[in-house]
């Protein structure tokens, strides 16, 4: 009986470690500078680091097949985008991991999102932030430093993100 308990405990510890690793290694941590990247979209044009200088930047990494991503992007469409789309000090970068412009165009024909969707077909941008797990959100202050990050989606976390955006824009 004792050996069964020990074996069970070892199994649970192993599963816990796998679960921790499933989130992937965080490559960008609070206080880190935004990784240098460029986005190229046939639909929305090019975004370079120079375009982001001095702005509060929200990087949202998603996939079209991801359920939690759909919930988060629904809130971006309904709440976040209408509030900040005209703010010159704010930039929203919604990036489709492993998606092309064609994939995102087809996807958006169904979703009808008003905000731009940028492709990252080879995970080149995503890999600067993490190895796996979506959705991911990274908020950078006007100084280009990370002030907020989250993995997954909950209504509470989204509310916290909205509060963080407000705080950063007020600075």
Image (cartoon, helix red, strand yellow):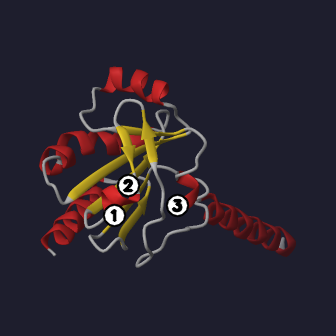
Residue at x 27%, y 54% (from the top left corner): 91
104 in relation to 34, above or below: above
Residue under label 2: 59
- Mark 2 and mark 3 in contact? Answer it, CB < 8 Å: yes
Q: Which residue is mark 1?
A: 139
Q: Which is more N-terminal, label 3 or label 2?
A: 2
Give the vertical position of 125 relative to 7 (above or below).
above
User: Pointer 1 and pointer 2: residues touching (CB < 8 Å)?
Assistant: yes
From the viewer's perspective, tell me whether residue 35 is left or right of residue 90: right
**Lower position in the chain sequence, tag 3 or tag 1:** 3
Query: Which disc number belongs to residue 129?
Result: 3
For numbered disc 1, what is the local secondary structure?
strand
Q: Position of residue 153 (x, y in %)?
A: 38, 52
Instruction: Identify whether 33 is placed above or below 123.
Output: below
Q: How many marks?
A: 3
Residue 132 position (above or below residue 13)? above
Q: Residue at x 39, y 43 (%)?
A: 46
Determine the residue located farthest toward the bottom in the rendered image.
31
Give residue 31's position: percent from left, percent from top. Answer: 40, 79
* Residue that appears at 61% across and 57% down: 131
Pinpoint residue 86: horizontal percent, then vertical percent: 13, 48
SS at circle 3: helix
Give the quarter of the figure containing the N terminus: bottom right
Q: Residues within 10 Å of mark 1 (few under 14, many from 20)?
A: many
Q: CA distance from mark 1 to mark 2?
A: 6 Å
């Amino acid at each position: 009986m004792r050996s069964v308990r020990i074996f069970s405990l070892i199994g649970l510890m192993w599963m816990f470690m796998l679960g921790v690793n499933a989130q992937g290694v965080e490559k960008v941590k609070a206080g880190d500078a935004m990784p240098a990247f460029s986005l190229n979209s046939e639909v929305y044009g090019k975004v370079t680091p120079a375009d982001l200088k001095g702005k509060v930047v929200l990087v949202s990494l998603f996939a079209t097949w991801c359920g939690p991503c759909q919930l988060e992007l629904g809130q971006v469409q309904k709440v976040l985008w209408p509030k900040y789309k005209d703010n010159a000090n704010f930039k929203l970068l919604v990036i489709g991991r492993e998606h092309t412009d064609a994939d995102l165009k087809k996807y958006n024909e169904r979703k009808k999102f008003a905000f731009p969707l940028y492709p990252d077909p080879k995970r080149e941008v995503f890999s600067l932030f993490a190895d796996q797990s979506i959705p991911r959100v990274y908020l950078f202050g006007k100084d280009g430093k990370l002030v907020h990050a989250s993995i997954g989606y909950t209504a509470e976390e989204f509310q916290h993100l909205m509060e963080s955006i407000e705080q950063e824009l007020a600075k």
